[in-house]
Amino acid sequence: MIDHTGVTASDFAASSRFYDAAFAALGGGLLMAMPPEQTGGIHVAGYGRDQPVFWIAQGAAQTPPVHVAFSARSRAEVDTFYAAAMAAGGTDNGAPGLRPHYHPDYYGAFVRDPDGNNIEAVCHRPE
């Protein structure tokens, strides 16, 4: 089981703005920020709903970019995630919609973060 995961961010400020917006749309947000003096000189931030489950750390972009999918509690939340992430500097990698090739109720949206990581919000519930 995964307890938490994360990515590096080549432009920490831009990535922070992106993930602030994306997580707010999913009912979460920034839960912990570690100052550089506690992390060997880099900025680190943890996001989630109840506890930090996704971390960004200042550093070179991941090569190749990674894919991370976040759970949404409704299809409307997926739509809100997509709009917020796009407005916060993301680029489209798949607009909100059903992906029946995964399963009949798979409703997801895909956005590239500032470093090109494929960030998804997905709801598995029927409408």
Image: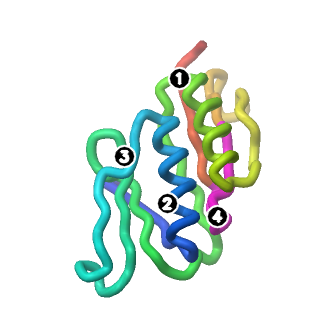
Q: Which amino acid type corresponds to the residue marked 4 in the rendered image? A: Pro
Q: Which residue is mark 3?
A: 48
3D distance between C-alphas at marks 1 and 3: 17 Å
Residue 13 % position (x, y): 52, 67
Element carrying mark 1: loop
| Residue nearer the viewer, 33 or 124 | 33
First in sequence: mark 2 vs mark 4:
2
Q: Is residue 102 left or right of residue 57?
A: right
Residue 12 % position (x, y): 51, 70
Q: Which residue is mark 1?
A: 74
Q: Residue at x 57, y 40 (%)?
A: 121
Closest to the camera, between mark 1 and mark 2, is: 2
Q: Is residue 56 left or right of residue 117?
A: left
* Residue 1 visible in the snapshot: no
First in sequence: mark 4 vs mark 1:
1
Q: Which residue is mark 4?
A: 114
Q: Which span is picked out in magenta?
A: 109-118
First in sequence: mark 1 vs mark 2:
2
Residue 16's tag is 2
3D distance between C-alphas at marks 4 and 3: 19 Å
Residue 105 position by quadrant: top right
Q: Is residue 111 magenta?
A: yes
| Residue nearer the viewer, 36 or 115 | 36
